[in-house]
Amino acid sequence: MSSDLPDVAQHYFSADPAGPDERRTITVRLAGRDVSVHTSTGVFSGDRLDLGTSVLLREVPLPPAQGTFLDLGCGWGPITLSLGSLAPAATVWAVDVNARARMLTADNARSMGLERVQVAAPDDVPDSVTFDLIWSNPPIRIGKNALHVMLHYWLARLAPGGIAYLVVQRHLGSDSLQAWLAGTLGSAYEVGRLASAKGFRVLSVRRLDPDQLTSA
């Protein structure tokens, strides 16, 4: 989440992407319906709903009706828009280092009437906020060290009993990431694999509540 990213990641994962903001409108299927959204150059998968996000949205359980949710690395907002549509009473934080991505997500949420979406840069989320649910297609290509720092920080902000679902390509290290999460987060978390599809793994990370820790 710093600006010191590998060259392959600079375009999509920089705070201010290079190149003009060339907007386009595409139609995608989110939360069971076709919606028109704005995308642009300089953001992740700016011309379509990417396969990893599609796998995540298909495989995860429905979100609870209420709570505080996080879309980590929101891009133009497919996960945020899905969460907001499925749980309109919940507060959904859409977080991305890319300013253009944040603007697109905010515009798309506004056009869909999703009033409880909060779009923010990572450093602008108040420290007091914790999350009942995290859905993320994390930016694997920022590099292993940066990815580990990012995931450790945000997963530590799961509320007791909260759960995160992360979609990761198998050939980009999903299995090693699952092992790292289990070894790093410790006994206060339960790490598993929810699903495998189309070359992707959907990993689950649950923060145990105090009663579960006591019984264990």
Image (cartoon, helix red, strand yellow):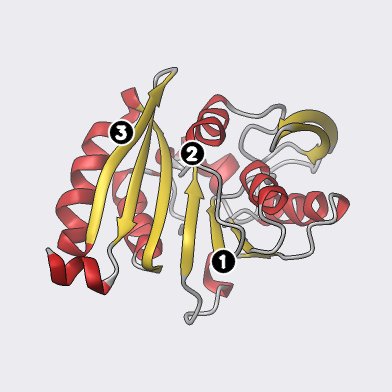
Q: In the image, which is nearer the foreground, mark 3 or mark 2?
A: 2
Q: Position of residue 68 (x, y in %)?
A: 56, 66
**What is the x, y in percent for residue 176?**
22, 36
Give 77 or 102, whichever is nearer the viewer: 77
**Local secondary structure at mark 1:** loop
Q: Quick check: marks 3 and 1 in contact, CB under 8 Å?
A: no
Which amino acid does the dot numbered 3 rest on? Answer: Ser
Q: Is residue 144 left or right of residue 21?
A: left
The span from disc 3 to disc 1 (Cα, nearest Å) is 28 Å
Rendered view: 50 above or below 101: above
- Residue to which mark 2 is pinned: 60
10 Å crowding of disc 3: few (<14), some (14-19), many (20+): many
Q: Which mark is residue 95?
A: none
Residue at 36% of width from left, 60% of height from top?
155
SS for dot 3: helix
Relative to 192, say whether 174 is above or below.
Answer: above
Q: Which mark is residue 67?
A: 1
Image mark for residue 174? 3
Specify few, some or many for label 1: CA neighbours under 10 Å numbering under 14, 14-19, or 20 or more: some
Mark 1: which amino acid?
Gly
Residue 109 on image: x %, y %: 78, 53
Closer to the N terminus: mark 3 or mark 2? Answer: 2
Residue drawn 60% across the image and 28% down it: 50
Picture quadrant of residue 184 = bottom left
The front one of 197 and 48 is 197
Q: Nearer the viewer, mark 3 or mark 1?
A: 1
Dividing the picture into quadrants, the one containing residue 67 is bottom right
